[in-house]
């Protein structure tokens, strides 16, 4: 495995990066435990111009401040008061583009994931959906603002990370109907046929 270089995050097209993340690995070293999972679903949020983004029209609050940090910053927010949502900040400082990691497929550290989630068996619900994957991998809001090139929450690639383009599905994003026309943008990417993908392509 090889950790993704800073240059991966600094590219200008957040939508393209979201597609390229399919097949990459999320690696966490938290509480002396190692977990590894392959990314199978992402959503791009195009900063200031995207009505579905937390930073639309330049909105800047304590909640989304980390979106404005340098490329490769970990941005985590809490949804519905309970779900930790892992995001990858891209582009450059002060341009709040980000990618939500929606689902991953467990690769290593599954016993740790089961312990964290209180599950007895590792079915698809273990890491299907952003809240589930964060819980399984020990990802919490307190880690927002750290960098993916660090040693706690990281992104890697391996020999299986290169996914043929025909195996990557594209659809509108999930749960952003209030964004009007932007809710229909084809900014969601997923690994076709993977059982950990959080929703059907049409949702």
Image: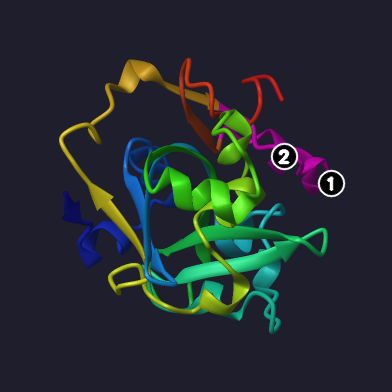
Residue at figure coordinates x 46%, y 69% from the top left: 74
Question: Does the magenta run of residues contain 43?
Answer: no
In the displayed structure, 119 sits above or below 201; it is below
* Magenta span of residues: 171-186
Relative image position of residue 58 (x, y in whole percent) = 65, 73
* Residue drawn at x 56%, y 29% as measured from the top left: 197
Pick the quarter of the image with the C terminus.
top right
Q: How is the image coloured?
A: rainbow
Residue at horizontal 62%, vertical 58%?
85
The image quarter containing residue 171 is top right
Q: Position of residue 39 (x, y in %)?
A: 42, 40
Q: Nearer the viewer, residue 69 or 109?
A: 109
Q: Nearer the viewer, residue 180 or 200?
A: 200
Task: Looking at the picture, tell me which residue is in the foreground, 47 or 139.
Answer: 139
* Residue 183 tag number: 2
Find disc 1 in the rendering and name its residue. 178
For residue 8, side relative to residue 128 (left or right): left
Which structural element holds mark 2? helix
- Residue 82 position by quadrant: bottom right
**Residue 110, visible in the rendered structure:** yes
């Amino acid at each position: 495995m090889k950790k993704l270089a800073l240059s991966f995050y600094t590219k200008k097209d957040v939508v393209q990066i979201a597609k390229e993340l399919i097949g990459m690995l999320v690696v966490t070293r938290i509480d002396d435990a190692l977990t590894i999972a392959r990314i199978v679903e992402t959503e791009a949020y195009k900063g200031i111009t995207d009505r579905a983004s937390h930073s639309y029209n330049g909105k800047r609050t304590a909640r989304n401040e980390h979106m404005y940090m340098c490329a490769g910053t970990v941005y985590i927010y809490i949804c519905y008061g309970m779900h930790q949502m892992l995001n990858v900040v891209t582009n450059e400082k002060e341009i709040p583009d980000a990618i939500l990691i929606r689902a991953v497929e467990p690769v290593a550290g599954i016993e740790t994931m089961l312990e964290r989630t209180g599950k007895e068996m590792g079915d698809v619900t273990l890491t299907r959906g952003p809240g589930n994957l964060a819980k399984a991998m020990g990802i919490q809001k307190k880690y927002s603002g750290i960098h993916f090139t660090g040693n706690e929450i990281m992104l890697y690639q391996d020999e299986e990370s290169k996914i043929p383009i025909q195996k990557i599905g594209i659809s509108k994003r999930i749960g952003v109907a209030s964004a009007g026309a932007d809710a229909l943008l084809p900014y969601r990417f997923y690994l076709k046929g993977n059982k950990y993908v959080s929703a059907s392509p049409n949702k």
